[in-house]
Image (tube, rainbow, N blue to C red):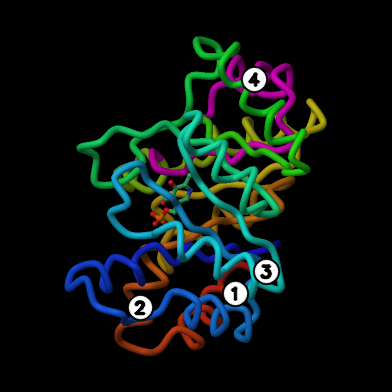
Amino acid sequence: MRLGVNIDHVATVRQARRAPEPEPVTAALLAELAGAHGITVHLRGDRRHIQERDLELLRQVVATRLNVEMAATAEMIEIAARVKPDQVTLVPEQPQELTTTGGLDVVRHAGDLERAVGSLRGAGIRTSLFIDTDVSQIERAAQVGAQAVEINTGPYADAAEDGRGAQRDRVARAAAAAGGQGLEVLAGHGLTYRNVGPIAAVAGIEELNIGHSIVARAVLVGLERAVREMLVLMDP
Ligand code: PXP
């Protein structure tokens, strides 16, 4: 199973002081050296962490796969078409949220998403849609032309211990449904060193995207060690 390391919070520390460091590009290279299979960043409308300058530099140096999370706005699609990451993950975005709070409503916004996916495809960029464990959303994701879905593991991560098994089963059913639609299956959000195991064991999931927990550990033990420790837990 592949690990995509989300390095947004390296940029969060930098932006806290509007300082030149820590440098997200350095973090990306260290994560790759430690075995990460991809680098993920979220370019938010409010630019609270990752900046366009980071995208441009990451595009030049990332040797694995650069995945950029973004809202499906005209501004973001234009940036993606210019920078050409390997993959765009379309996510819903609320200005006040601390982090992404749920999956896209692909059923409701099918027309807009189909246009966004089409524009990205035209620019040679594959598209993943961040979605909840809802089969109707998964079917519609395939219909709007996405090549992949990232299943939201936030409810699994947030569940009390007695509800976690049910949430894990929801992720497993969603992964099977997405695979049945011919979609590549990714998962992420809220995954940590303690809760990653059962999700890493779900059949059909090809990649996990993990950010906060890895960067939080990296502050204390270093990024390479933090990435290696996560890789071990994903593939015991
Ligand atoms: N996947 C998506 C779509 C996200 O928006 C985020 C957070 O940026 C992640 C995965 C990573 O979540 P976390 O930081 O909780 O590991």
Marks 1 and 4 sit apart, C-alpha to C-alpha, by 36 Å
Q: Nearer the viewer, mark 1 or mark 3?
A: 3
The secondary element bearing badge 2 is classed as: helix
Instruction: Provide the residue span drawn in magenta.
Output: 133-155
The type of residue carrying mark 2 is Arg
Mark 4 sits on what residue?
115
Quarter holding the N terminus is bottom right
Q: First in sequence: mark 2 or mark 1?
A: 2
Mark 3 sits on what residue?
37
- For disc 2, does the CB lie below 8 Å from ligand 1? no
Q: Nearer the viewer, mark 1 or mark 4?
A: 4
Task: Tell me what residue is drawn at x 38 percent, y 38 percent.
Answer: 155
The type of residue carrying mark 4 is Arg
Q: Nearer the viewer, mark 4 or mark 3?
A: 4
Camera-nearest residue between 187 and 176: 187
The secondary element bearing badge 1 is classed as: helix
x then y, percent, for residue 199 = 56, 52
Q: First in sequence: mark 1 or mark 4?
A: 4
Q: Nearer the viewer, mark 2 or mark 4?
A: 4
Mark 1 sits on what residue?
231
User: Going by the picture, which residue comes out furthest to the left?
Assistant: 17
Marks 3 and 2 sit apart, C-alpha to C-alpha, by 19 Å
Marks 2 and 4 sit apart, C-alpha to C-alpha, by 39 Å
The type of residue carrying mark 3 is His
Mark 2 sits on what residue?
217
